[in-house]
Image (spheres, coloured by chain):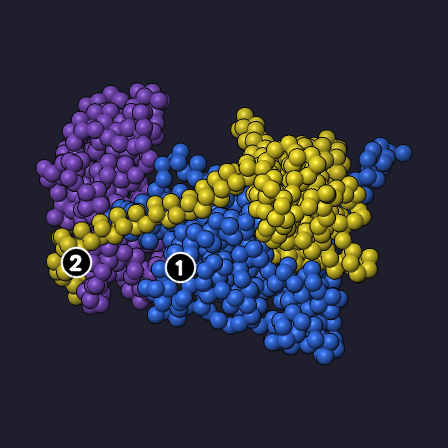
Chain colours: A yellow, B blue, C purple
Amino acid sequence: MSTPRKTAEDDGSIAYAPVIDWDKFKPSRSSLAARKRKDGLMHALIILAFIVALIPLISVLWTTLVKGAQRFNWDFLSHNMTNVIGGQQTASGGYGGILHAIIGTLEITLGAMVISIPIGLLCAVYLVEYSGDGKLAKTIRLLVDVMSGIPSIVAGLFAFSVFTIIGGPGTANGFEGSVALSLLMIPTVVKTSEEMLKIVPNDLREASLALGVTKQRTITKVVLRTSLPGIVSGVILAIARVIGETAPLLLTAGYIVSTNMNLFSGQMTTLPVYVYQEYSKFRAYCPEDAGASCVAAIPMQRAWSAALMLIVIVLILNLIGRIVAKIFSVETKR
Amino acid sequence: MSSLTKPVSGKRFDTVFRGIVYACGILILVVLAAVTVFLFVRAWPAIGGNHEDVADTIGKFTGGKITSFWGYVGPLLFGTVLVAAIALVVAFFVSMGIALFISHYAPKKLATVLNYIVDLLAAIPSVIYGLWGGLVLVPAIYPFWNWVAQYLGWIPIFAGPAANPARTVASVSVVLAIMILPIITSISRDIFQQTPRLLQEAALGLGATKWEMIKLAVIPFGKSGVISASMLGLGRALGETMAVLMILSPGLTYSVQLLKASQNQTIAANIAAQYPEANGLGVSVLIATGLVLFVLTFLVNLLARKITQKASVK
Amino acid sequence: MGQRIDINHLNIYYGNFLAVEDVNMHIDANKVTAFIGPSGCGKSTVLRTLDRMHEITPGAHCTGEVLLEGQNLYAKDVDPVAVRRDVGMVFQRPNPFPTMSIRENVLAGARLNNRKIAKSDADDLVEWALRGANLWNEVKDRLDNPGIGLSGGQQQRLCIARAVAVHPSVLLMDEPCSALDPISTLAVEDLINELKRDYTIVIVTHNMQQAARIADYTAFFNLKAVGQPGHLEYFADTTTMFSNPQNEEAERYISGRFG
């Protein structure tokens, strides 16, 4: 055992330390109990937060399902809103439907995909393969981040401004909506593709370049092919995000009751806009002698049914995206 | 001729491809510049144009109460920030709870299920939240707001009587909070899960309870990430249109009485609401307000990004 | 003062996997006991059961008894939080709290127990603990600087100061020098030698010379094969262990023939 070294000069050792009265620091029984109580309280609050968050989710899904199922049938899916008068039944025995909105949603989203997937993907290729992390790349990354925070209505205003400046006032068509949506979609595509390209091992690139293959072929045949499932999954999730956008389409694609197949001319209805329009109608007009077949509350019922359709589409897209991602992650492990 | 100088097959396309890729990178810069320029060009008549015409147009929007552009943007900006800020406050605490629950309290299997649920919440389109908020939440929450007005009415922001139907800032904020919850939760959860095990064990080794461990190790570690996540959530709430449009009964005051209807309106919802009726100059006024919103969200997102960068440099 | 530890029939599990089998051992008060053995033999795992840190890994648990001065740490009414206050731990890599100053790091544990510590008492405690960890002279002029600004060896001594400031009776050290340079290692080893006046010390080490230098007793853990549970192969005072081990496996390990 070493003895405390006492020298004239303080050498920093314990021998010169102040005497500690440990009773001062001793936890009292009550303070220990209080700490335990606080621990338990926080645990309870954290579980409570989780339950509180579950309530709206369950409520949203449940009401959409129950109220949406009411008018969700083949007639609803296969008709548009032409010849719908107030709350009265149409000739086909239904109350109007969402066929035009489904077609509009598909065309406009397809348009957005055609614009944003090549641009987003190639931008990611630039960032990962060509930029060398220079100043330009840093700026682009920053702006992509900023772009992903653009409010959707501003994207709508932008597309609207461009098209009215080019095409004259009052221009509204489906493609205008596609442009607005692609502004929201590009940043997501860039980010997910960039992540996926980054995880492609460098060995693969070098192996290909060493064989005398050009850089372009290395990228398209090796790098992109390796990361394809991940990119596909990211793109699907990006589509799921923009397919539910409402505000920008309200300003750009407009709203009509009939089916418009031409993306580049004339207004076009999409599902989210349809939901909103039906919601704003509140009640349909029923003349006094209309009888039981006239449903005054039909707009809200249509809104819920269209919402159900929208949720189903979004969830299916999410599911597909996840499944693709899962298959991919298994492959990399092998 | 040496084989080394012979053209390699695909050489030309290699150069073309390189050009295309560069163009796409630069296109991002061009697009953002274009957004700003186009918005500015279209907004200019409202900001720098003929004052009398502008006054006339804004007078039409507001029933003659407000006639200047800045007098119009002011309350809208106030309403936007108010609604988003309250939504953030509500969402923040719940998100922290869920994030900590997933990262530190829930068993692994439950945590996986919860991650799916958070993603699901994020995937639901905003128009459906608006529909649900307007038709389900507004009637359901009125008794609660009424109770709040009765018992907490002495606090100015809760001054009664509570509006019925509750198409108020309070109800909208609740819906926006639900909408931004997933963003804040998922980012915070990721960063909490990255807390070094060593730090957590250091705290536990000193005799910390689980909550004390979280306070000592997890929260200080995740602080900047949580702040940046909150900023992103705030940015989302500032720009949200549909839920506000479908729930809030609008007004153009600087009031903070959350439980009363027709007090405030947000920029985004105002654009969507006034747009169908607006004439050429009216649209310019709306685009100008949109530009204000764009600048605001731009700054918030930039700030979020700067905070993350600073933290990663450390 | 240090306290003695008795381990009886300790089996340690990760889920259903038996990681360490049937450990029986007596650890003397105010002595340094070293755990050595090949990788994967469970020496760190055993150490972590002595302050109930093992169980924070999901699914991890153990059976048997760990007696601290006769009190079973795994008895039903024992609170793991209280155990960890009485049995301090120093980890493989220095882990000061990155957002705290040197002073706050030392006080972190004490503040948990007692929120309202008078400033003069706190000053005394900081000085006492830093002197005890042989760090006082190096940092006394910059106590408010962040703890992570120190060198690796200083950080590790700061962690020791933080552990002793809670006034435990046992100090567990899990390879405390493995991330340190030779000079810092020497400083920590000197410190361990001084600390055993006040604490019972259990140290896990990969370095047999280190065990030989600082330990009074040495426990050799081994495993029969990969995937098999580890076990306590041989326990002896350090001199016997390194000069004349009465166990063939231990002899082989110490002479460097495996592990």
Residue where numbered disc 1 is placed: B145
- Residue B67: x and y in percent read 65, 77
- Residue B33: x and y in percent read 71, 60
Rendered-image quadrant of the C terminus of chain A: top right
| Image mark 1: chain | B
Q: How many marks?
A: 2
As drawn, C49 above or below B213:
above
| Image mark 2: chain | A
- Please, which residue is most extreme toward the right here? B1
Which residue is rendered at x = 50% and y = 55% of the image?
B176
- Compared across the picture, whether B304 is left or right of B219 comes to right
The amino acid beneath tag 1 is: Trp
- Compared across the picture, whether B218 is left or right of C37 comes to right
Q: Quadrant of residue C43?
A: top left
**Front one among A247 and C255:** A247
- Compared across the picture, whether A263 is left or right of C149 comes to right
Badge 2 density bin: few <14, some 14–19, many ≥20, Cα 10 Å? many
**Front one among B263 and A237:** B263
- Compared across the picture, whether C58 is left or right of A175 comes to left
Whether residue C158 appears in this view of the structure is yes
Whether residue A13 appears in this view of the structure is no
Residue where numbered disc 2 is placed: A25
Which residue is rendered at x = 35% and y = 60% of the image?
B147
**Front one among A205 and A63:** A63
Which residue is rendered at x = 52% and y = 40% of the image?
A67
- Please, which residue is most extreme toward the front here? A289
